[in-house]
Each structure stands twice: as structure tokens, then as C-alpha cells.
Image: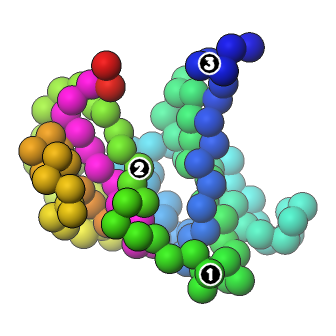
Amino acid sequence: MQLAEAPIRLARPSRDLDAAHRFWVQGLGLQVLWQSGADTEGGHALLMVGAPGAAWHLELVDDPLAQDESRPGPEDLLVLYLGAQFSPLLIDRLVEHGGKRVTSRNPYWERWGATIVDPDGYLLVLSHRTWD
């Protein structure tokens, strides 16, 4: 497998997996790819979400010890290049499901998209640009 084709897992701690589920699944529209309770190997509840067929997914880990150690900063961005203008209803849905629309520190993202804080304090940027 070529490095450019390698699947990517983005893992980060979550303070509330139920709130994360509402935001990422009900708000953004991702699907649950895997979910487990704290009784699984490692002792942490997990929520993995993604788009079917995508080469990436987001793994949210309920780890109370990591929550205090990991504080998202203004450059902790997850950018989704949608390649088309998105509906303002998507932003409304994300806010309704626990997100908060904010002004990005970088004016580039204000020009080319919208920035939303997820329930764990991380920044999601929806860009209407394409990657290439």
C-alpha cells in the first residue's frame, strides 16, 4: 500500500461521548463505525465516526485522565474540504446538536468556510474549497 492511500484514524479524548455522538452523527451526518463501552480492551469507551468509504475516521475516547491533560488550542483544526458551498442549515444543525459557531483566528478559514467548536472544544472547519 502506498502512503498516500493509507487510511487515517484521528484519535482524541472526549469529555462526553453522548454529546460527541449528537454533534458528529446527528449534527454533521457522519455514521457510527464502531462504538464500545468501557468494558472493552483498554478500559475506555470508544466512539468511531466517519463517512462510509472514506479513508479516514474520527475516534473519540472516553478517558477521564486525558481530559485534563489535553486542551485543544486555536490550531487544533479538523478541516473538511467539501468542494461546494454548504447550506447554512448545516451550521444550524451543528449548533442545535451541541456546537458553537466561532470566528476563526485565521482569516483564511473565515473567507473559505465556517468554524464550529465541537462539544469537546475542538475546532471543525467546513470549507467550500477543494483540497487540490
CA distance separating discs 2 and 1: 20 Å
Q: Is residue 48 left or right of residue 76?
A: right
Q: Is disc 2 surrounded by few (<14), some (14 to 19) or many (20+) residues within 10 Å?
A: some
Name the residue tied to disc 2. Answer: 78
Name the residue tied to disc 1. Answer: 69
Secondary structure type for disc 3? helix
Q: Is residue 124 magenta?
A: yes
Q: Quadrant of residue 130?
A: top left
Q: Which residues are magenta?
A: 120-130
Mark with earlier residue (1, 3): 3
Q: Is disc 3 surrounded by few (<14), some (14 to 19) or many (20+) residues within 10 Å?
A: few
Q: Is disc 1 surrounded by few (<14), some (14 to 19) or many (20+) residues within 10 Å?
A: few
Q: Verify CB contact (< 8 Å) between mark 1 and mark 3.
A: no
- Amino acid at circle 2: Leu
Residue 56, position in %: x, y?
Answer: 56, 35
Residue 36, position in %: x, y?
Answer: 74, 59
Q: Is residue 90 left or right of residue 59?
A: left
| 108 shown above or below 23 | above
